[in-house]
Amino acid sequence: MNRTTMGWIAAIFIGLLWGIPWIVGTPILEVMDAQVLVWARYTVAFITLAIILNVGIASGKIEKKRDFKLNWENRHDIVWSAACGIIGQGAFSFLSFLSLDYITASENGVIQGLIPILILTVGFFRHNARFSTMQMVAALGAFVGVAILVMDPNSETNGFNIGHLICFGSAASFATMAYARAELAEKYGSVATMFHQFVFASIGFGMYLVFTGADLSSALGIFSSPLRILCITILGVGISGVSYIIYIYAMERVGVDGTGMALNLMPLSSFVLAVFALGESVTPMRLLAIAVVIVSMMMFMKFGNDKAKEETTELEAQKA
């Protein structure tokens, strides 16, 4: 099996894996609040990445670009790392888990599928990025798909409610930190950057739990059943830890574009697992919504890639 094929397998695996956090978190939420789960998840995650980072650097598999210093001169990177961890990871996860009190896991997964569009929307306002006309049409199509899902009369949630807004806020939290995350990764390396973020997410939510008087002992509920132990392992070790190594592996072999296309499988993964693992119903409108969102996201990525290639060609022509 050649490197490209292995890269595609890795990219597809990540696309499917990143669609399931909200499903595997459901059994754990039966014994603890969402904010406690977030703290537990990122505590497990930063321990996992600490091991991966140290072993990777020692073996030469991971390149150490620069030390992350906790001093006044480095205050800019410290603040942005904390923001990426507490907002881009912690709030993203917390709001998403919180939304499950009001909406289904499959609805959550579809709304999270809007993240690529939201990231470029942030770029539009902050970095003067521009959408092509076809990208705008595709983005509109994705939101139409979500509207179809929300308004399904046969849905367990009986239409639009606060949970959909909470979930959208979750996706927006992740998207607002995307460019800052990319800048930090360029400076410190992808794995090291994620490690810093997970540390700040764990510390930030730990302080929040202490301040609000939350029941930290409820985190021990994770050990109340083999299923919950498996779920926190998938969340903390798999999705938040090891998966980023696989994601980097995929990008190195099929590129950012190919990996981005594979991430469009996230809504489908959420939907399928919610149906088989949680017993959620399958309705014609729900199937239509999933199809509309996935097709729209694939179009959005394709036209975005085409636009980038055109701009590169024009730049090369001007240099010539």
Image (cartoon, grey):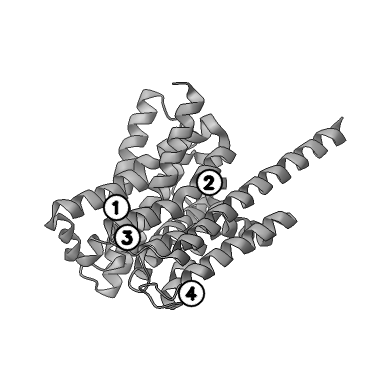
Residue type indicated by callout 4: Met
Please name the residue shown 73% across and 45% down the image: 307
Q: How many other residues sit within 10 Å of disc 3, few (<14), some (14-19) or many (≥20)? A: many
Please name the residue shown 25% across and 52% down the image: 232
Residue type indicated by callout 2: Leu
Q: Position of residue 34 (x, y in %)?
A: 30, 66
Please state if 221 lies on the left or on the right of 13 as rendered.
Answer: left
Q: Which residue is mark 4?
A: 151
Quadrant in the rendering for residue 22: bottom left
Q: Earlier in the sequence, mark 2 or mark 1?
A: 1
Q: Which residue is mark 1?
A: 43
Nearer to us: label 4 or label 2: 4
Q: Quadrant of the N terminus?
A: top left
Q: Position of residue 152 (x, y in %)?
A: 45, 72
Please state if 222 lies on the left or on the right of 15 as rendered.
Answer: left
Nearer to us: label 4 or label 1: 4
Estimate the spatial distance between the alpha carbons at disc 4 and disc 2, rounded to whole Å: 40 Å
Quadrant in the rendering for residue 261: top right
- At numbered mark 3, what does the secondary structure look like: helix, strand or loop? helix
Estimate the spatial distance between the alpha carbons at disc 1 and disc 3, rounded to whole Å: 8 Å
Q: Quadrant of the C terminus?
A: top right
Q: Which residue is mark 3?
A: 38
Q: Earlier in the sequence, mark 4 or mark 2?
A: 4
- At numbered mark 2, what does the secondary structure look like: helix, strand or loop? helix
Q: Position of residue 5 (x, y in %)?
A: 48, 27
